[in-house]
Image (cartoon, grey):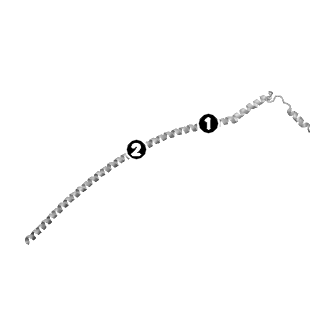
Amino acid sequence: MIVFPFLLFQMLSTEVEGGLFDFNATLPLMALQFIILTTILNFIFYKPVTNVLDERDEYIRNSLTTASASLVKADELTKTYEQQLAESRKKAQDIIKVAQEQAQQIVSVKIKDAQAYGEKLVSEAFHQLSIQKEDALKTLEMQVDTLSDLIKSKLLND
């Protein structure tokens, strides 16, 4: 049994000619196998993977183009809406200003009407008081005349 491991060691330790690069008939066969494997891998694996990657790149480019177009459109819409909002605010302010001016005019007209009505009431009251005063004076004069006639007749009768 000791002989068998020794022979095995001796067989393994003997060097075979050629080593890493052996330039005999196996080299062209290996090159042919490599070319066939490369061609098969190219058709079976690399081209489909390349096609998928190209399609993905195209999809990403299209998505980016669509997104940038959408952003541009959104910016335009935003500007349009902001402009419309500014115009609406300006119109609202103009309407408020006109309404305030109209309200001020209405108030001033109402105040003038109220003053005129107050003056009319005062003049009517003054006129009524004047009439009542005159009536009271006439009544008083008549009573004074009656009383003086009565006093005169009593004085003359006595």
Quarter-of-image position of residue 15: top right
Residue placed furthest toward the bottom = 158
Across and down, in percent, residue 135 comes to 17, 62
Residue that mark 2 sits on: 91
Across and down, in percent, residue 115 comes to 27, 53
Residue that mark 1 sits on: 57
Cα–Cα gap, marks 1 and 2: 50 Å
Kind of residue sitting beneath label 1: Asp
Left or right: 116 with respect to 30?
left
Residue at (22, 57) in percent of width and height: 126
Across and down, in percent, residue 108 comes to 31, 49
Residue at (72, 32) in percent of width and height: 38
In this view of the protein, which residue sits in the foreground, 31 or 88?
88
Residue at (44, 43) in percent of width and height: 85
Quadrant assignment for the N terminus: top right
The image shows residue 108, relative to residue 134, as above or below, that is above
Residue at (43, 42) in percent of width and height: 86
Left or right: 21 with respect to 58?
right
Tags 1 and 2 touching, CB below 8 Å = no
CA neighbours of label 1 inside 10 A, class few (<14), some (14 to 19), many (20+) = few
Quarter-of-image position of residue 143: bottom left
CA neighbours of label 2 inside 10 A, class few (<14), some (14 to 19), many (20+) = few
The image shows residue 54, relative to residue 151, as above or below, that is above
The image shows residue 105, relative to residue 63, as above or below, that is below
Residue placed furthest toward the top = 23
Mark with earlier residue (1, 2):
1
Which label belongs to residue 121? none
Kind of residue sitting beneath label 2: Lys
Label tally? 2
Quadrant assignment for the C terminus: bottom left
